[in-house]
Image (cartoon, grey):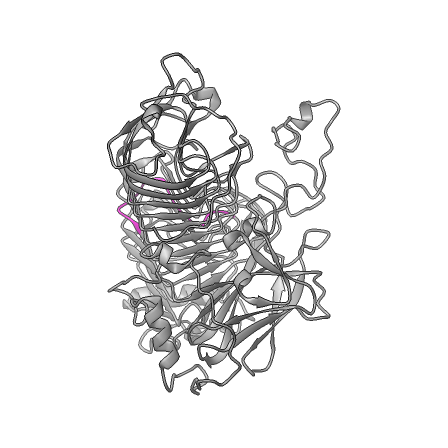
Amino acid sequence: MYGSYDDNAAPGRGRPLAVRIAAATTAVGLSVLTGGTAAAGSGPTGPAPVVTRAGLDPALVAGRGAAVDFIEQEAENARTTGTVIGPDRTAYTLPGEASGRRAVRLAPGQYVEFTLPAAANAITVRYSIPDSPDGVGITAPLDVTVGHGRARTMTLTSQYAWLYNQYPFTNDPDAGLLHPDWWITECSCVPASTTPAPTITTPFRPHHFYDEQRLLLGRAHPAGEVVRLTAPAASNAAWTVIDLLDSQLVGPPHLAPRAVNVVAFGADPSGRRDSADALDRAISFARRTHRTVYLPPGTYQVNRHIVVDDVTIEGAGSWYTVLKGREVTLDTPAADGSVHTGVGLYGRDASVGGSSDVHLSGFAIEGDVRERVDTDQVNAIGGAFNHSTIDGLYLHHTKVGMWFDGPMTDLRVSNTLIADQIADGLNFHTGVTHSRVSQTFVRNTGDDGLAMWSEKTGNAHNTFDHNTVQSPVLANGIALYGGTDNTVSNNLVADPVREGSAIQVGSRFGAEPFTGGLWITDNTTVRAGGHELNWNIGLGAIWFYALDRSIDADIEVAGDAFLDNTYNAIMLVSDWPVKDKYSITGIHFRDIRVDGTGTSVVSARAAGSASFADVEARNVGAVGVNNCGSFHFTPAGSEFSLADLGGNDGGWLAPWLLPNTITCDDRPPVVPPPAPSAW
């Protein structure tokens, strides 16, 4: 993470951002991929760069999130001939899904340009272009120039973006309601049961607008050079929206001369021929000889699962080695219900013990998933992995980046990027224990970014630590559904869009109960606590939801910061049909900072209790505690009580609110808070 230290990081990654920029700027004779050097002043210099993390000054989120190798610059802070769109946190809008809730729209012929804050030989562009009328998507050019270099063209696509309608969504912009028997906010009715039938305009609920694309620049460019992104005058796209640019200095390819080289077994690094069988042969040989499998630089076509067990597979680095495949329709559905298959590395099924001692590192997986089919196993990584590690991968355009079906134990995931998924980023599902995800960056998922789901069998003793989750289009940045003694710590979560928020603790989806402890410590959320469309209310940046059962474990929320909350910082809620059956108790909030709420610090819409110590809040838009309890409004007060353990500064927890004064405003007006600042 920028501005903090990581003693275990790779060279250059453990230093604060300012030190890294200075070192990169003054470096002499920097080696580059083409064997040349980066000459200072080799191209035009631009205005001073504005470096951000999650759209904020990095100092505001220091120590939180993943220690990534790239530097983020938001397009709205760059020089442009286009138009800044936003800010807007409304679902189904381009700025609403943008990082920082703003972006730049380019008409053909317009550009946006970024000044490199440090030497770089690679960029990632997050963008959106229009869909095609039939929902298949289009491609369109984007010209890239760096300094005085020649222009090169990226071919952008909307084939993996633009979903419509109700869950599980469709690619057809003209489709009628998928569930006319569901209540919808657009008419505040159930369309199938309403006379006269409401008019539903199409496209209905467009979303998932953005994609990203990576580009190696061929040589290193020094700090101060300008990267210009231009929508060509002859572009077929009516507009091109640029959200942000990530720049980085990618090291040379990793070599493993003594490993089992997949090319020797017939794998094709050009990507023209299918390499799945060759990979199987190389893996089998490596297991017999107790050697590592090596994937040299190249793109390898793989259109099915590769099952791995007791093997180490290393690539040349995620910028150099790519496993890429197309989604394949199965002749008959698989036993697990899949109707498609595609590229993915899978452990053995948990029913046969899963896989063990698998170690994957240094490559990318590029899928071809364009629709959500929940029964499909078309994930980049899947199955069950015991005593295994996954490090340094880039996972893109699959259904889920990593979906693990336990029981399984002792998995370590680290230093991985997961982007542009149709559903979750990563899910520990069913009986995952003693496992850890750290230093992993997740952006633009179609469901929870990181999740622990204790369906049927509880997850236990797992940790999500020092991860970054940005712009989950649906659901939550980090979600916990049941489990025992799990930890969520030092994470950064920003810009959840709808039907969820930054962090959720939920008794839902048939999960086993929360038991033992749950520790949610030293996390930062940014621009969370958004609008829940189905309930038509605002959520909290962190929210506790009792739907299937009560939540009564020992839960500690400590050291967290909730910044620029659209509605509330904290919410505790039970669903209306079970509000008199289930409660939320045993939540302890300590050493919390809340900087800006559109409404309240705490919104209580359930029976139960919580304690608060050293919770500081400022720029609060409504009453500090919006206490509705379970909505009975008896003379005894709310069914939810608050205990003040001292040190709660900012006036938000006034004595008259305690312990259970009813202050219920079902839908209070929103007062947008000022931007966060240093405390």
Does residue 242 belong to the magenta stretch? no
In this rendering, is residue 634 above or below 45?
above
Please state which of residues 182 and 384 is positioned toward the viewer in this rendering: 182
Is residue 407 shown above or below 514? below
Between residue 183 and residue 88, name the one nearer to us.
Answer: 88
The quarter of the picture where the N terminus appears is bottom left
Looking at the image, residue 676 lies above or below residue 657: below
Give the quarter of the image for residue 632.
top left
Res 349 visible: yes
Q: Quadrant of residue 620?
A: top left
The quadrant in which residue 158 appears is bottom right
Question: Where's residue 436, x and y in %?
Answer: 30, 51
In x, y percent, where is residue 197? 73, 27
- The image shows residue 29 at horizontal and vertical percentages of 38, 87
Residue 129 placement (x, y as % from top left): 64, 59
Residue at 25 percent across and 64 percent down: it is 8
Q: Is residue 96 above or below residue 58?
A: above
Q: Which residues are magenta?
A: 423-436
Question: For residue 425: magenta?
Answer: yes
Lateral position of residue 164 relative to residue 386, left or right: right
